[in-house]
Amino acid sequence: MNDWPALDDFLRTDPRDVGCDQAMEMLHVYVELVAAGAPAEQQYPGIAAHLRACGPCGEDFEGLLAAVRGEAD
Amino acid sequence: MMPVNRMVDETPVTATGLDPESAWWLRVLAETGPRREAALARLHELLVRVARAEARRRGPRVRITGPELDDLAYQAAADAVMAVTGRLGQFRGESRFTTWACKFAIFEVSAKIGRHFWRHPGVPLDAEDWDRLPDRLGLEPARESEWRQRQVFVAVVLNGVPLDTLVIELGSSRNAIYKMVFDARRKLRAALVAGGYLGHDTQERS
C-alpha cells in the first residue's frame, strides 16, 4: 500500500468542473434540489464536479444544506 | 399603494412566479416604512441564526470559539443583510428567497474565517521553500504567472493554507486561485504520467 492512488485521486481534474464563480452563483438552487432529494448531480454535473473538488465551495455547500435542512425542521 | 424603495425597484422577478413566502419577502423589502423595517429585523434574525450555526459547525476546525465566534457570526449576518438588500434585483426566483438569502450568510462566514486565519496564520503564508516542488514535475516557472501558480499550489496543497485566506493575502478571488490549483494539478499529473509514475488510464478526465 502506498500513497500513489491518493495522489492520483487528488491530481485528477474533471473538465466538467465549472469553477467557483458559476457553482456559487447557483448554489442555492443546487442545495434546494439536494434537500428535496432531486437528482441535482444529473441536472448540474459541472457544479457537482466542482463541489467534489473544491474544499471551500464544498464547505459552503455543506453549510447551506445544513441551514436549509435546519430551517425545514 | 405602499411607497417603493428606489434601491430595489428594478427587481425583475414578478411575484406571480414565486412561492407566497418569497413573494412576501420581495414585496415587503421593496417598500419603505415600518413593514420593511420589521422584515429587515426578521431577515437579520434568520441570518444570525444561520451564521451562528455555520460558525459553530466550522469552529472546531478553525479554532474559533466563545465570544469571538459569536462576534464573527453577528458580523457575518449584518454583512449578509447588506448583501441581500443590495442584490434584491438579482434574485431570479429559482429557489426560495430565504435559501438565496442564507447563501450570503454562509459566504460571509467563509470570508470572515478566511480573514481570521490570515490574521492568525498557523503556517507562514510566504513559505521560503517553494523549491520543494521539483521542476521536473512540470511546474517549472518560466513566467511570472507560473511563479504565482507554483506559489499558490505550494501554499494550498503543501502548507495547508486555506484557499480563502490566500484569496485575501493575494488580493485575488476564490475562482482565480482555484483555477491556478486546478491547472497545476492537471500539469503535475500529466508530468507524472509521462514519467511513468502514474498510469494513463481511461478514467483520466483531464
Image (tube, rainbow, N blue to C red):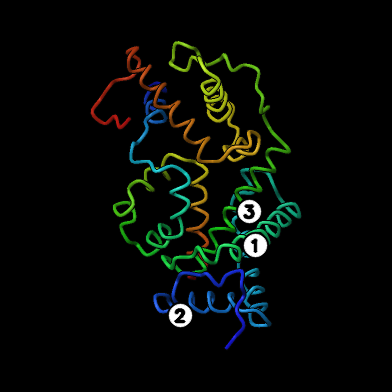
Which kind of residue does numbered mark 1 sit on? Met
Distance (Cα) linking label 3 and label 2: 30 Å
B194 and B10: which is toward the camera:
B10
Q: In the drawing, what numbered circle is on residue B20?
A: 2
Q: What element carries label 3?
A: helix
Using a 10 Å C-alpha cutoff, classify the residue at mark 2 as few (fewer than 14 neighbours), some (14 to 19) or many (20 or more): few
Q: Is mark 2 on a helix, strand or loop?
A: helix
Query: What residue is shown with label 1?
Result: B82
Horizontal relation, residue A15 to residue A26: left or right: left
B23 and A65: which is toward the camera:
B23
Discs 1/3, front: 1
Residue ID at (43%, 16%): B138
**Are discs 1 and 3 both within one chain?**
yes
Q: In the drawing, what numbered circle is on residue A65?
A: none
- The chain that hosts pointer 3 is B
Which kind of residue does numbered mark 2 sit on? Pro
Q: Quadrant of residue A43?
A: bottom left
- Do the CB atoms of the residues marked 1 and 3 lie less than 8 Å apart? no
Pick out the residue farthest to the right: B67
Q: In the drawing, what numbered circle is on residue B55?
A: 3
Does A69 sit above or below residue B162? below
Residue B23 x %, y %:
48, 77
Q: Which of marks 3 and 2 is nearer the N terminus?
A: 2
**Are discs 3 and 2 both within one chain?**
yes
Residue ID at (49%, 46%): A57
Q: In which quarter of the image is residue B52?
A: bottom right
Residue B182 x %, y %:
44, 32
- The chain that hosts pointer 1 is B
